[in-house]
């Protein structure tokens, strides 16, 4: 009897959907807008966002993925999902991603850490400090 587990395409799809949802929320985009083969940098991520993604992946999947790996080697949704499929134990399989709806605030879904205030409020950067 083999101790090796057989990975199903369905499991990879669920993991990829969770990674896509996590990244989409961080980028402020819809998941459908993200190409799983494009690099994170091509999708608009910068180094700060990749640090947040690294922490979000560890929180969501229990697998540490260093920031550097998100730049080299695991630099796309597809590559990261395949890595997580190998690393996440079957008993810790992620539940299917909840359907993305525009009427549910991003803060209601706790699988991603909230963006820091400077990222959440880019409009205030353009306005500058308020004077009373």
Image (spheres, rainbow, N blue to C red):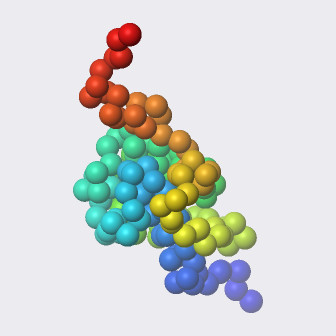
Q: Residue at x 44, y 41 (%)?
A: 51
Q: Please say whether residue 29 is visible from this viewpoint.
A: yes
* Residue toward you, 24 or 108: 108
Which image quarter: residue 96? bottom right
Which residue: 49% across, 57% down?
Answer: 22
Nearest to the observer: residue 21 or residue 76:
21
Image position of 17 with respect to 69: above or below:
below
Percent x, y for residue 18? 53, 65
Task: Where is residue 56? Give x, y as percent.
Answer: 54, 49
Residue 66 visible in this rendered orientation of the protein:
no
Residue reaching furthest top?
132
Query: Eyeballing the image, is 56 above or below 96?
Result: above
In the image, taking residue 3 as reference, residue 23 lies left or right, namely left
The part of the image, by quadrant, that contains residue 126 is top left
**Residue 37: x and y, percent?**
31, 69
Q: In the rendered view, does 43 fall on the left or right side of 84?
A: left
Report the front residue among 100 and 103. 103
Residue at image location 53% in from the left, 51% down from the top: 106
41 is higher (above) or lower (below) than 101: above
Task: Identify which residue is drawn at 63% across, 67% down.
Answer: 94
Splitting the image into 4 quarters, where does residue 88 fall?
bottom right
x and y percent of residue 103 in the render? 52, 59
């Amino acid at each position: 009897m083999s101790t090796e587990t057989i990975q199903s395409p369905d499991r990879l799809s669920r993991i990829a959907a969770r990674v896509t949802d996590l990244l989409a929320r961080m980028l402020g985009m819809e998941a459908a807008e993200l190409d799983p083969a494009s690099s994170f940098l091509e999708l608009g991520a910068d180094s700060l966002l990749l640090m947040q993604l690294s922490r979000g992946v560890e929180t969501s999947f229990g697998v540490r993925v260093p920031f550097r790996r998100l730049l080299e080697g695991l630099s796309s949704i597809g590559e990261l999902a395949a890595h997580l499929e190998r690393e996440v134990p079957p008993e810790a399989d992620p539940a299917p991603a909840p359907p993305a709806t525009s009427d549910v605030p991003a803060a209601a879904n706790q699988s991603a850490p909230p963006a820091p205030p400077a990222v959440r409020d880019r409009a205030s950067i353009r306005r500058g400090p308020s004077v009373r």
